[in-house]
Each structure stands twice: as structure tokens, then as C-alpha cells.
Image (cartoon, grey):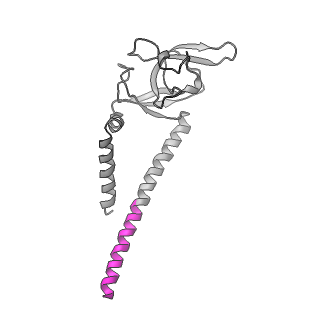
Amino acid sequence: MGWIGDTVDSVKSIQIRQLLTQAVSLGMIVTSALIIWKGLMCITGSESPVVVVLSGSMEPGFKRGDILFLHMSKDPIRAGEIVVFNIDGREIPIVHRVIKVHERQDTGEVDVLTKGDNNYGDDRLLYAQGQLYLQRNHIMGRAVGFLPYVGWVTIIMTEKPIIKYILIGALGLLVITSKD
């Protein structure tokens, strides 16, 4: 019985070791992704250096599912630039074009008015009640590049949560059952 008990304990310890190794590997992958994201935030100066276009309001320039790369510099924002902005009280950022720049005479600060390329009117109806322009603190960044259609993965997982849970379950099962 001593030899069998030792063998069983040996197998159990190997499984626990493999499980711990896989957990550490998963933790390192997640940590690496966070470090890369924070590094991109520092390099681009944007709180969200990558965003997905969620609607068709910027067609034909950007289609739903395109991924935009953002950069936020100290340069003044100009009419015609595509910006991503947050509105007070809304969680989801909006991607639209600057159509008018308004400089305040007293402070020299620049406010902007935006519009989706595929929309009929400007965005004043989207802004907070009584707000006519966006201030610099609302703007997350300027679009400097894009990848077409790659963001559909995010859109599908957001709109169909069951797909997200199936994918996470499958990846978790893969991690648990892998031997290497």
C-alpha cells in the first residue's frame, strides 16, 4: 500500500503543479496585456488608444466594426479632424468629425462642434442638456489610423453575450486540459 499511496500522491502533486503553472501563465498573459495597454496610453496620450466604431454614422469613411487608433496631442483641434469623445452621462464614446471650432475670447480655450459624416445634423442633440460645444476634456483622442472590420469580434461579443461565454468557457477548458 505504501508504494501505491506514494504513486497516487506523486500524480496528484504533478497535476497541482501543472494547474499552478497554467494559472501563472494565464496571469502573465493578462498582466502583459495590461502593461501593453498602459504603455499605449502613455505613448498616445489618450485614455483609450484603440476604439471600435459601433454605428454607421461615419460611413463611408469608417464602417461599423472598424478599429480606430487614437492619439491625443497638445496641438489645437482643427475642423475636419475625426475625434472620439465622451459625453457626460454616457458610457460609450462617439466617433465623429469636427465641423466647427470655436475659440473663447476670454480664455483662449477651443471648443468644437461635431457631426457624423452620415448624419443630417450636428451633434448638439447628443451633447448634455444645454451644452453647445465639446470642451477639450470631453475629447479622448484623434483618429490617426484604422483597421477595417476587425472590431466585429467585440461587437458580436457585446451584442450576443452567449457567444462571449461560450468562447471564455472553451478557452478555460483548453487551459485546464492542455498538458504543456
- Counting the numbered discs, the total is 0
- Is 8 contained in the magenta span? yes
- Is 19 contained in the magenta span? yes
Q: Residue 118 in the image: x percent, y percent? A: 38, 16
Residue farthest toward the front in the current orientation of the protein = 129
The C terminus lies in quadrant: bottom left
* Residue at the spot 53% in from the left edge and 42% down from the top edge: 39
Q: Residue 141 in the image: x percent, y percent? A: 52, 28
Residue 156, by quadrant, is: top left
* Residue at the spot 30% in from the left edge and 43% down from the top edge: 162
Q: Residue 129 in the image: x percent, y percent? A: 53, 19
Magenta-tinted stretch: 1-22
Relative height, residue 93 to residue 11 (above, below): above
The N terminus lies in quadrant: bottom left
Residue 13 is left or right of residue 93, and the answer is: left
Q: Residue 90 in the image: x percent, y percent? A: 48, 29
* Residue at the spot 35% in from the left edge and 82% down from the top edge: 6
Residue 177, by quadrant, is: bottom left
Residue farthest toward the bottom in the current orientation of the protein = 1
Q: Main secondary structure of the magenta part?
A: helix
Relative height, residue 120 to residue 66 (above, below): above
